[in-house]
Amino acid sequence: MRAFDLTPLYRSTIGFDRLGTLLDSLGTFDGEAPSYPPYNIERVGENEYRISMAVAGFGEGDLDIELKENTLTIRGEKNTETESRDKTFLHRGIASRSFERRFQLADHVVVKSASLEHGLLHVDLVREIPEAKKTRSIPISTKTGETAKVIDSKAAA
């Protein structure tokens, strides 16, 4: 029997925790996901998430973060031609190629902030559920002066 790995789908969705767990339980699929740049998705709190992406060599001006219709797109583009003219490399191991990474966000997940420190781009997300969609508790009241009605007077054994 062939197994399917849905990890690429699971790791690019944020806020679909139950859906991701369900898809993970279905099996594995041998598909090759893009691997540059490497990133982590962490659950920081009950409704808070953080994407940490390794973008060594990229500055704030080289990165672009865009949110459109529940799709978070992070692009990096570095002009290497001007840098290459000024320097002669004996070995070039730090990748500076352009990239575009997309993440599908669940409903009500918004970008709270983005920061770049020590070669890591951190994008903080939070799920803000509107008051109308939150679960409410409805208090039960009895009429004053009335005693509670007994439906069955037999004691449970």
Image (cartoon, rainbow, N blue to C red):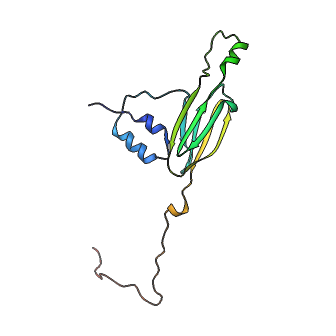
Which of 124/71 is in front? 71
For the image shown, how many numbered marks are present on the structure? Answer: 0
Q: Residue placed at 69% from the left, 31% from the top?
A: 61
Q: Is residue 76 left or right of residue 20?
A: right
Q: Residue at x 32, y 32 (%)?
A: 3
Q: What residue is rendered at 67% in x and 11% in y?
A: 89
Image coordinates for residue 105, horizontal then vertical, percent:
51, 45
How far across and how far down the image is residue 146, in percent?
43, 89
x, y percentage for residue 100? 55, 31
Front-lying residue, 73 or 134: 73
Which residue lies most toward the bottom here?
A: 145
Q: Quadrant of the C terminus?
A: bottom left
Left/right placement of residue 98 relative to residue 11 reads right
Query: Which x, y percent locates residue 102?
Result: 52, 36
Q: Is residue 130 above or below residue 16?
A: below
Judge whether 135 appears above or below 154 on screen: above
Depth check, front residue: 58 or 41 = 58
Q: Residue at x 63, y 11 (%)?
A: 91
* Viewer-proximal residue among 81 and 9: 81
Q: Look at the picture and state if 90 lies above or below 82.
A: above
Question: Where is the N terminus found, in terms of image quarters?
Answer: top left
Residue 130 against residue 115 in the figure, above or below: below
Choose top left, top right, bottom left or bottom right for residue 58: top right
Q: Quadrant of residue 86?
A: top right
Name the side, left or right, on which 78 lies relative to 134: right
